Amino acid sequence: MFRKILIANRGEIACRVIDSARRMGVATVAVYSDADLGARHVAMADEAVLIGGPAPKDSYLRGDAIIAAALATGAEAIHPGYGFLSENPEFVDAVEAAGLVFIGPSGRAIRAMGLKDAAKALMTEAGVPVVPGYHGENQDPEHLAGAAEAVGYPVLIKAVAGGGGKGMRKVDRAQDFAAALASAQGEAQTAFGNPAVLIEKYVEKPRHIEVQVFGDGTHAVHLFERDCSLQRRHQKVIEEAPAPGMTAEMRQAMGQAAVRAAEAINYKGAGTIEFIVDASEGLRPDRFWFMEMNTRLQVEHPVTEAITGVDLVEWQLRVAAGEALPARQEDLAIRGHAFEARLYAEDVPAGFLPATGTLAHLRFATGARIETGVRPGDTISPWYDPMIAKVVVHGPTRAVALASLARALEQTEVAGTTTNLAFLGALARHRGFAAGDVDTGLIGRDLDALVHEAEAPLAARALAALAAAGLESGQGTGFALWGALRRSIAFDPPAYLRVEGSGRVAVEIEGAEHICELRTDGWWVDGAKTGARFHLGGDEITVFLHGAHRFARPDPLARASQGPASDLTLAPMPGLVKAVFVQPGQQVAEGDRLAILEAMKMEHTMLAARAGTVAEVLVSEGSQVEAGAALIRLAEEEEAA
Ligand code: ADP
Ligand code: ADP
Ligand code: MG
């Protein structure tokens, strides 16, 4: 076994590889860009080498710098993770020319599968079913239109060099073909520097089912299938293993085809054969076709690990170090069911736009396997994939595993950036998905319902109002000073608070009063234990209660000049009371100066929110106050009259 390896990647996959290497007693070297100096993968590795600037082309795509780092640190092998250089045959050749081991397939095998058209020709030869279509060299638009006609509409135009759903167009009618072709070719040229396309029959009610294979360069085994049909814009969202509705007959046919595919190219290491399946009449052994091979470890490999008990990274290291295949086909079996959900910093309602931000609060569920490259306080930068974590669950049956997934997502707490957590939660509770009735169109069809943000439960709203007043810890000057006053707080919708005792607050929202009580096990609302937790960000309050509910935090500086009902003037931040200008009984007009608070080296003047009579001055000059402390109370309107 290797003594030391270098991981040519970042984020969760770098951390994942380090985990297995460490368990095997193999030392690890991380590489990082300027943007990743404080990243988790750097902290986890035994050594780390800076390889350049934040843009991938200046660092994680610099094969020369990575090979130099391996040689300088005495690493014997390089694990590429996925993405970046993992499917780059020139990099593999360069690694080997430097006398190092590439933990993955040969450059030859990657080349054989690199272009979708050549791969399909090779697979046809090996007796693996491929989607009917035209995979030839003639790129003349007339010829391609003729091929589409022969295949029969609808068809799919695909970039031969494609990946990540780019350069792909579905065409339903002959009259739309020319325009779709031009746009697919343009996109392919921009993304891959290669405008060539192929034409495929568009499979109706398609399911994406892929088979994990593992080879030693001569023989290969398969580790069963994964279903990745839950996709948006051809990108996977939730994956599972095994595939719902899979029959023994179809599993055997797909597994054998995948092994034939891998052996046809003398595949070494972990790889995936992706198939498209026509599920319009259930799963049938004559209705799956080869789509492409991913010659690397796949993002969703943990679901396969969960059902087989195999550590695929360990297998990668062992086979790369020259060991034989760690298991025979008959040693491998499926146990239970597993799901993986990809948690991203992204704005789902805005069309799944990638988001950035600092993870001010981050807490993962217990009882799930979490693969992550970030820690609380880390930043999701615009430079890289905005994945926060993969949440992986396993259970004895699909129903149990799916319930675990829903629960794990509910228990996941992220604040500081927009995430797809609510969307994932909605998917995990989707009825069709629960019934195993999946196809690649499911998300698109039900997008509105899945993206709809349900209104936060009343308990979460009541607790957010209480947190907006700084009462969430059950302590503070508010409890001591507010007595039995009913006070309004700037909150949307407006809320009224009345402190009823230590750790007991009545919150009125939309005319209904909710009793919030802090007990030893957290906040109870209207006699029900909530288990709620809070995160207070600069301008946002997040209440975690069956999911994350975000509320705009009333601007504390605006509080002093809030609506007419406001009786209390509160300290917007911790500070020193520099001056008090009023006394009890004094009449004030709206906007009159009441006091000056010095905080963060700046003076803030507290103004009267309305005209009235000062009922109480609750602080004296020179006193230090907490944020939210009541400074001045005006007499209630009736009282003053
Ligand atoms: P798959 O599920 O087939 O592995 P993904 O949807 O995970 O594909 O990723 C699409 C493409 O983006 C793949 O080519 C993958 O290698 C790449 N990719 C995904 N995540 C990352 C990442 N964090 N860094 C770099 N490349 C990535
Ligand atoms: P990429 O290299 O971009 O991952 P793939 O060929 O793997 O491209 O296809 C990506 C996705 O597009 C599949 O998972 C599937 O959802 C859809 N797709 C691909 N081929 C077909 C087809 N012939 N019919 C219907 N959908 C398809
Ligand atoms: Mg693919």
Image: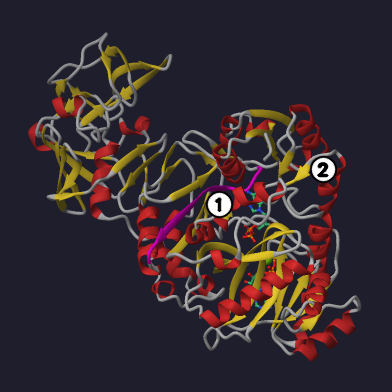
Numbered badge on residue 509: none
Is 222 on the left-hand or right-hand side of 520? right
- At horizontal 17% and vertical 45% (from top left) the residue drawn is 524
Q: Which residue is mark 2?
A: 95
Expressed as whole percent of the image width and height from the top left, the position of residue 495 reads 23, 45
- Of the two numbered discs 1 and 2 on the same chain, state the one appearing first in sequence: 2
Give the dominant element type of the magenta stretch: helix, strand or loop. Answer: strand
The percent position of residue 272, horizontal first and vertical second, equals 66, 64
Residue 604 occupies which quadrant of the picture? top left
Question: Looking at this view, is 624 or 392 the one in front?
Answer: 392
Indicate the position of residue 494 as horizontal and vertical percent values.
26, 47
In magenta stretch: residue 213: no
Foreground tag (1 vs 2):
1
Q: Position of residue 21 (x, y in %)?
A: 60, 40
Q: Is residue 363 visible?
A: yes
At 54% across and 52% down in the image, what residue appears?
346
Which mark identifies residue 311? 1
Q: Which region of the structure is painted magenta?
A: 383-396
Direction from residue 228 to residue 245 in the image, left or right = left
Some atom of ligand 1 lies within 8 Å of the CB belonging to the residue at label 1: no
